[in-house]
Image (tube, rainbow, N blue to C red):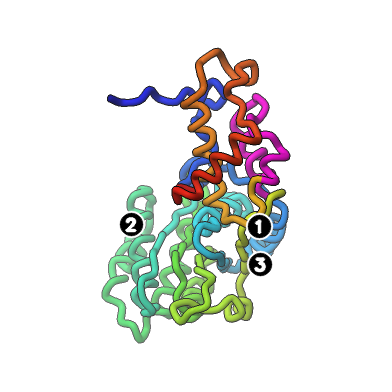
Amino acid sequence: MLSEPLRYELYGLRHGNPYRIEPLDPLARAGDRSLLVDIDGFVSTDALRTYLRRTVEAGESAFVVVSGRDYTGRTTIANHVLDVYRQVSELDDRLLVSRIKVGHNRDFEWVKEAMVELQNEIEEADLTLSPALTESLNTIEGIDEGVYQSRYRGLARRLHGELAGQARGRCSFGVVFEGLRQTSLVDAMRKVFKSSRSIAVFTHGDYKHANTPSYEELSRLDVHLIKLEPLKGEQVRCLAEERWRAASALPSPFPPDSLETAWPAPTPIKSVVKTLSLLLDIRLGSAADHGPWPDNTELEIPHRFMFFMIRMLNELGAS
């Protein structure tokens, strides 16, 4: 027997649970933009915007590395970087993105895959390119490793020129590499994107082992480096309250002081969001339907309930 669907509208939530666990992507879903909260001490959007604006005004490509451990929100922040770049470049929603999961250390293979995927994005967007450039793009997979950087650089430069002159408005492109394995991939993309006025974003697992570069190595690169850390109690409170305000006009059912003290140790943002999502669903699923919040006090998430459920979820490994 299927359970009844949760009635999020009782909380004034027209678009469901605002503490979604999957990565936010404001380029693909405009509604996600309001859920990307500026948390003090987490990511400085002002610093990011300043860097991207400087590269755009200088006619240069942008290179950003998002570094952090698992569950710290690397993919969401990479998507946020792309969205800020789109805004700074005044592209409306016309930013084509190639997304690549890096699986080994052969830079040539991943750069080639990124270029092929970018070609696919152009075809799906039904953009008009000159016959000469279309023919050149069709040679991507046949370009030899020894000359790929210079050949791809020429293609990327020509592609920028034709996309910027599209009849339906300016368009640009970027690449996201998930799971940076070595800094040479950044160097390769700097050469390939040198003259294309585009953006390359890399996510990096910040662990001290041989499979990834160290944070110290990344800090020596000529990139904008974003370091993601687990959230402290006051940052959890900011995240919970700001996401709620973006989703509902009704007051939050989470007691503010409990939000700050329920996470005494720094916790990755994905674990925090997952716990908030479960708390909301559990309360909504168990409370009797006596009308909407806040008149229906059974929908409140009181201090003792929150602490009990967080402890139980931690013991079950569900948060």
Q: Name the residue under label 3.
A: 58
How far across and down, in percent of the image, does residue 136 sit?
33, 68
Q: Which of 319 and 190 is in front in this view?
A: 319
Q: Mark 1 points at which residue?
A: 43
Neighbourhood count class around disc 1 (C-alpha, 10 Å): few under 14, some 14–19, many 20 upward:
some
Callout 3 amino acid: Ala
Callout 2 amino acid: Asn
Residue 30 seen in render: no
269 sits to left or right of 57: left
Q: How far is the residue under mark 1 from the one under mark 3?
A: 24 Å
Residue 130 circle label: none
Reply above or below: 16 against 59: above
- Which residue is painted at 47% across and 51% down in the image? 166
Query: Quadrant location of residue 220?
Result: bottom right
Q: Mark 2 points at which residue?
A: 120
How far across and down, in percent of the image, does residue 52 sit?
64, 61
Comparing marks 1 and 2, which lies closer to the viewer?
1
- Which residue is painted at 49% across and 52% down in the image? 95
Q: How far is the residue under mark 2 from the one under mark 3?
A: 29 Å
Q: Main secondary structure of the magenta part?
A: helix
- Which residue is painted at 54% across and 13% down in the image? 290
Callout 1 amino acid: Val
Quadrant housing the N terminus: top left
Comparing marks 1 and 3, which lies closer to the viewer?
1
Neighbourhood count class around disc 3 (C-alpha, 10 Å): few under 14, some 14–19, many 20 upward:
few
Residues rendered magenta in the picture:
235-261
